[in-house]
Image (tube, rainbow, N blue to C red):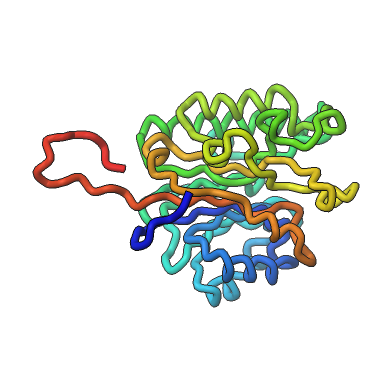
Amino acid sequence: MRQRQGTTRLKIATYNINNVVRRLPNLLSWLAESQPDVVCLQELKAAQAAFPVSAINDAGYHAAWQGQPTWNGVAILARGTEPIVTRRALPGDPDDSQARYIEAAVRGVLVGCIYAPNGNPHPGPKFDYKLEWMARLAAHAGTLIVAQAPVVLAGDFNVVPTDADIYAVRSWARDALLQPAPRKFYHELLAQGWTDALREMYPRNAPYTFWDYKREAWSRDAGLRIDHLLVSPVLRARLANGGVDRGVRGQDGASDHAPAWITLREKAAVPKNSKSRRRAG
């Protein structure tokens, strides 16, 4: 899908950076080349005070983040503007201290940045937590649908939605990412009205977003699609383009994920003298 000259579009990306301090050069290089307007980062693996905000500001981005030492951590970057934070955690469990969700308004769109639990080993407490967390995500996502808000839920969902989203099923059959229960939660999100943007763009062969460090997965293109961008119903008609910057995965010192992104068309204006009461966009 080619972009028309003279149109304004919003480019929203998600990138599991897998340690934002260690891979800061990779991140800054990609930001300079791709120039997304909004970026959801996951797996910061950095305490709140250790987030490299100065370097990101120097690159032209403002940031809101929820850090955590060693594990987890999520951030939303916005080019040339401040993200307005609306949530720093999913509702439903005030005792959950894992930094896995942050939500902010940016340029007229509400963006939820997601780092869902991996859930391995399966079965076990980590898998139970994964299901409980995803249930809370589904409940919150449902309230956003009811509000008819322009929302993008973007991040590492740690779910392979279908067997078409993985290079081979047999070697991963016991993994938490492919189990029926997480897949059920993911498809329940779609049933609420969310659109899997990359699947919408590429109905037959949506691009992989993750290649394990082990077993030469990258060189064999033994990938999985676990990083997703879900758009609410009011944004579906504004989908213009999307893809995965897979070359980033092959760079020195790269994360095991590649950035995935979409672009949204500018919201259409309703003529003042129009008798139509249709929702714009």
Occupied quadrant, residue 28: bottom right
Residue 29: give x, y in percent of width and height: 64, 70
Q: Is residue 215 left or right of residue 239?
A: right
Residue 105: give x, y in percent of width and height: 41, 52
Occupied quadrant, residue 19: bottom right
Residue 257: give x, y in percent of width and height: 71, 52
Identify the residue at the far right of this view. Answer: 215
Give the residue displayed 62% in from the left and 34% down from the top.
Answer: 204
Q: Between 141 and 39, which is closer to the camera in this rendering?
A: 39
Identify the residue at the far left of this view. Answer: 273
Q: Is residue 270 left or right of residue 204?
A: left
Q: Is residue 147 visible?
A: yes
Residue 109: give x, y in percent of width and height: 40, 49
Give the residue displayed 18% in from the left and 34% down from the top.
Answer: 277
The correct choice, above or below, for 148 with respect to 154 in the image is above
> From the image, which quarter does the C terminus lie in?
top left
Q: Is residue 73 visible?
A: no
The correct choice, above or below, for 157 with respect to 191 in the image is below
The correct choice, above or below, for 133 with respect to 17 in the image is above
Give the residue displayed 72% in from the left and 29% down from the top.
Answer: 163
Give the residue displayed 37% in from the left and 61% down from the top.
Answer: 5
